[in-house]
Amino acid sequence: MRPPGLILAGGRSSRMGANKALLPLGDKSVLGHVIGRLTPQVSDLAVNANAPFPGFENYRYLADDLAGQLGPLAGILTGMRHYSRQLAEASHFASAPCDSPFLPSDLVPQLSAVCPDPETIVIATSLERRHPVFGLWPIALAEDLEHWLTDSDNRRINAFLNRHRTVTVDFPSLQTRRGMLDPFFNINTPEELTQAAAFTEILE
């Protein structure tokens, strides 16, 4: 069974100066590409954001359960809590950020294939780097994560991963006419949006 999915879109886009999820990239917005690539891989899809985005009002939106802009782990906790209530049969949910339009079309199947049990976290890697916002998250870890976030020093996602059994799946770079592209390339600045526009052939 495909796991449910959550798009992490609670950031402030401070380096972009505008909501990066809604910026145009080819024939869609950045968020539109993320939704298009993730939807076929999951059984249900929600967006972690405080309010609906224009043009995407039909999706389910989940505001952080914890106040204070605590970063991606707060979004992960929100997903754990939501799916524990809504999909009791799900052991994990898949996450992806709203600013990575080239995410692999087989991301979730690849992560699911190596998941050994209901309490293991599975994270994507590429080019010898972990990408923890692309992962399969055990719903059973909700209590531990909520307790972890009560300490203001506990915001780093990799530090939380180090507390739990975590396995990784490596994804190769994408071959394009413009050269090789990391499938987890994310857009945080106007310069990165310009770079991404050179690779829209992958999104066609």
Image (tube, rainbow, N blue to C red):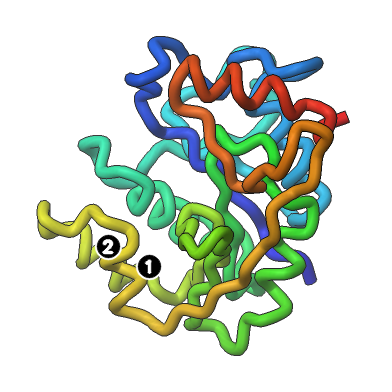
Within 10 Å of disc 2 (Cα), the crowding (few <14, some 14-19, many 20+) is some
Q: Amino acid at mark 1?
A: Ala
Q: Are marks 1 and 2 in contact (CB under 8 Å)?
A: yes
Viewer-nearest residue: 45 or 202: 202
Report the residue at 70% width, 40% height from top: 102
- Residue 114: x percent and y percent? 66, 81
Q: Amino acid at mark 2?
A: Glu
- Residue 166: x percent and y percent? 46, 79
- Residue 190 visible in the snapshot: yes
Q: Disc number at residue 146?
A: 2
Check the image and name the residue furthest to the right: 204
Q: Image quadrant of residue 23?
A: top right
Report the residue at 44% width, 11% height from top: 18
Q: Is residue 120 above or below residue 124?
A: below
Q: Is residue 64 above or below residue 49?
A: below
Q: Which residue is mark 1?
A: 142
Viewer-nearest residue: 196 or 119: 196
Q: CA distance from mark 1 to mark 2?
A: 6 Å
Check the image and name the residue furthest to the bottom: 116
Task: Please give left or right for residue 138 compared with residue 115 in the image.
Answer: left
Within 10 Å of disc 1 (Cα), the crowding (few <14, some 14-19, many 20+) is some
- Residue 174: x percent and y percent? 75, 48
Label 2: state its secondary structure.
helix
- Residue 69: x percent and y percent? 26, 36
Label 1: state its secondary structure.
helix
